[in-house]
Image (cartoon, rainbow, N blue to C red):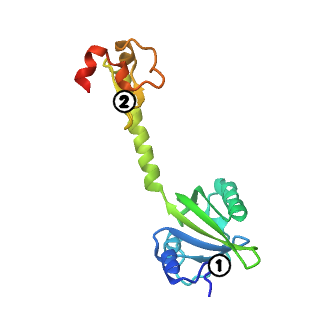
Amino acid sequence: GAYYGLSSDRALFDLCEWTSDYVGVTDAQGRLLHLNPAARQLLEFPEGEDISTHSVFEFYPEHDHKRLRELIAAARREGICNGEISVLGADGTEVPVLQVTVANRDAQGRVTGYTSALRDVAGLVAMHSTLRESEERFRTLADASPLGVYRLDRAGRHIYATPPWFALNGLDEWPRGAPWGTTVHPDDRDGIW
């Protein structure tokens, strides 16, 4: 038999049920049919409680309803879609997630519902925020320094330089396409490589 439009393969069922990601299945109108244990815990629905009276839109902040409609339309059109959005925990806290939605279809190709997997990315969002704040502190300190400071990416491409660095090298800006070593005085290059 089928599992709400998914394959009856037991491994797929177990994956959807026991992943720490939130997995939900709706009908074509967006009424909840199934939530895995992780989603039930987030939304504080006890196992066995009837969820079919709830619309999926109840669990997204109002400002993300348009985005959710876009994701559903893309899944209907393309068969599958993904994107960033937020869901609401039972206490009303917004949880940023990456959502993948698949349109479930019957034998005639009509959409019968949707299956979505949502990964909580709150930790990743917080990490990016901390990284941005750290970058801002670095730039504030470096810009205030009388020293010539520059940064390169792993490929050796220029990312950032302070005004004193440009002054020390007699440049107004980084030479477009130039590797960093070309801005070092020729007499000093041998000691760097």
* Relative vertical location of residue 70 with respect to residue 42 in this rendering, above or below: above
| Nearer to me, 129 or 103 | 103
Q: Position of residue 65 (x, y in %)?
A: 68, 57
Asked whether 137 or 71 is in front, the reply is: 71
**Which residue is painted at 52% across and 73% down in the image?**
44
The three-letter amino acid code for the residue at tag 2 is Arg
Residue appearing at x 40%, y 26% in the figure: 179
Give the camera-side residue of 73 and 32: 73
Residue at 69% across, 59% down: 74
Numbered label attached to residue 119: none
- When asked about the image quadrant of residue 135, the answer is top left
Q: Quadrant of the C terminus?
A: top left
Q: Quadrant of the N terminus?
A: bottom right
Around disc 1, counting alpha carbons within 10 Å, would you say few (fewer than 14), some (14 to 19), or many (20 or more)? some
Seen from the viewer's position, the closer of residues 63 and 84 is: 84
- Find numbered disc 2 in the image and state the secondary structure of the residue it sits on: strand
Label 1 vs 2, first from the N-terminus: 1
Asked where in the image residue 33 lies, by quadrant, the reply is bottom right
Residue at the extreme bottom: 1
Q: Residues within 10 Å of mark 2 (few under 14, many from 20)?
A: few
Q: Which residue is mark 2?
A: 151
Disc 1 residue type (three-letter)? Gly
Left or right of 60 on screen, residue 131:
left
Marks 1 and 2, Cα distance to the nearest angstrom? 52 Å
- Judging by the rendered image, the residue that carries numbered circle 1 is 5
Give residue 11's position: percent from left, percent from top: 49, 80
Q: Position of residue 3 (x, y in %)?
A: 60, 82
Q: Position of residue 57 (x, y in %)?
A: 66, 64
